[in-house]
């Protein structure tokens, strides 16, 4: 699991607005580091209800001008494979355009499909070095790092001809059975699983020097999958 934490504080901070008095302001940097540090030391981190009480109590107790704290926690599940991906947010998407302007006996289908919000993470095998440094750069070069991102996998199929339905209600559409469907075509039911598998395998197994490299490798390896 991992946690998404939202904390809202009610305090005597009006003077920071009306009198430009920053002595009551807790810097955003401090708040972020507090959220990173507290889970490391709290004995209640494995129980979200208790950890929220712990964190809220810490905030109210530490700062004299804070009277209330509202802490919301979302606990998100991860499932371990070669890498890990987050269960729950992944969405399968399909968009289809049916075009009968050339005639009802010449119906054409265009389809776009895929999966969005596929969360992936690996704890090693990713680096970022030799980028351009300038006066704005704070990022340090690293030979190995934790890399997590959200992947949208979308693919557009070649147009296909659809035989017009022959029954009165126009409901019966002839679609080839699986063993007649060409691999990578819109009629193939397993294409999403195969595309998803290659996405996870490339992310897990290839050493990446940048996000750009991962994007290229995904496209390079998908050729045999999608034809």
Image (cartoon, helix red, strand yellow):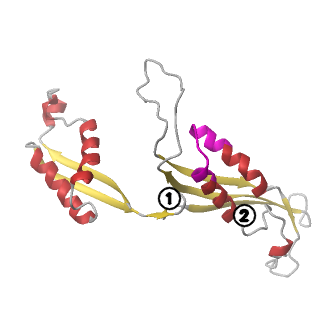
User: In the shown orientation, is residue 197 left or right of residue 15?
Assistant: right
User: In the shown orientation, is residue 178 left or right of residue 126?
Assistant: right
Whole-percent x and y of residue 217? 67, 45
Q: Quadrant of the N terminus?
A: bottom left
Q: Residue at x 28, y 64 (%)?
A: 46
Which residue lies under the disc numbered 2?
A: 191
Q: Residue at x 47, y 19 (%)?
A: 134
Total marks placed:
2
Residue 176 belongs to magenta span: no
Whole-percent x and y of residue 54? 18, 58
Q: Which residues are magenta?
A: 202-216
* Other-residue count near label 1 (Cα within 10 Å), few / some / many at <14 / 14–19 / ≥20: some
Q: Quadrant of the C terminus?
A: bottom right
* Other-residue count near label 2 (Cα within 10 Å), few / some / many at <14 / 14–19 / ≥20: some
Q: Main secondary structure of the magenta part?
A: helix
Mark drawn on residue 84: 1
Mark 1 vs mark 2: give the one in front.
1
Foreground residue among 167 and 213: 213
Residue 210 belongs to magenta span: yes
Say whether residue 163 is visible.
Answer: yes
For the residue labelled by badge 1, is the local secondary structure a helix, a strand or a loop? strand
Mark 1 vs mark 2, CA separation in Å: 21 Å
Foreground residue among 217 and 181: 217
For the residue labelled by badge 2, is the local secondary structure a helix, a strand or a loop? helix
Foreground residue among 6 and 47: 47
The answer to whether 22 is drawn above or below residue 196 in the figure is above
């Amino acid at each position: 699991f991992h946690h998404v934490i939202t904390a809202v504080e009610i305090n005597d901070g009006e003077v920071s607005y009306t009198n430009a008095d920053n002595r009551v302001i807790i810097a955003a940097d401090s708040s972020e580091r507090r959220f990173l540090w507290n889970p490391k030391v709290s004995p209640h981190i494995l129980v979200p209800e208790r950890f929220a009480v712990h964190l809220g109590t810490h905030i109210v107790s530490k700062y004299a001008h804070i009277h209330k704290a509202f802490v919301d926690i979302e606990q998100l599940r991860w499932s371990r494979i070669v890498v890990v991906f987050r269960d729950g947010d992944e969405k399968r998407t399909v968009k289809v355009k049916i075009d009968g302007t050339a005639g009802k006996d010449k119906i054409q289908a265009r389809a776009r499909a895929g999966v969005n919000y596929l969360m992936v993470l690996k704890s090693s095998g990713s680096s970022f070095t030799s980028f351009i440094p300038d006066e704005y750069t704070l990022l340090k070069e690293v030979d190995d790092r934790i890399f997590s991102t959200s992947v949208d996998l979308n693919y557009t199929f070649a147009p296909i001809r659809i035989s017009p339905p022959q029954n009165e209600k126009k409901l019966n559409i002839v679609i080839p059975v699986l063993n007649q469907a060409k691999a990578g075509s819109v009629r193939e039911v397993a294409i999403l699983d195969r595309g998803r598998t290659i996405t996870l395998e490339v992310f897990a197994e290839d050493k990446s020097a940048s996000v750009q490299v991962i994007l290229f490798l995904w496209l390079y390896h998908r050729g045999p999958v999608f034809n």
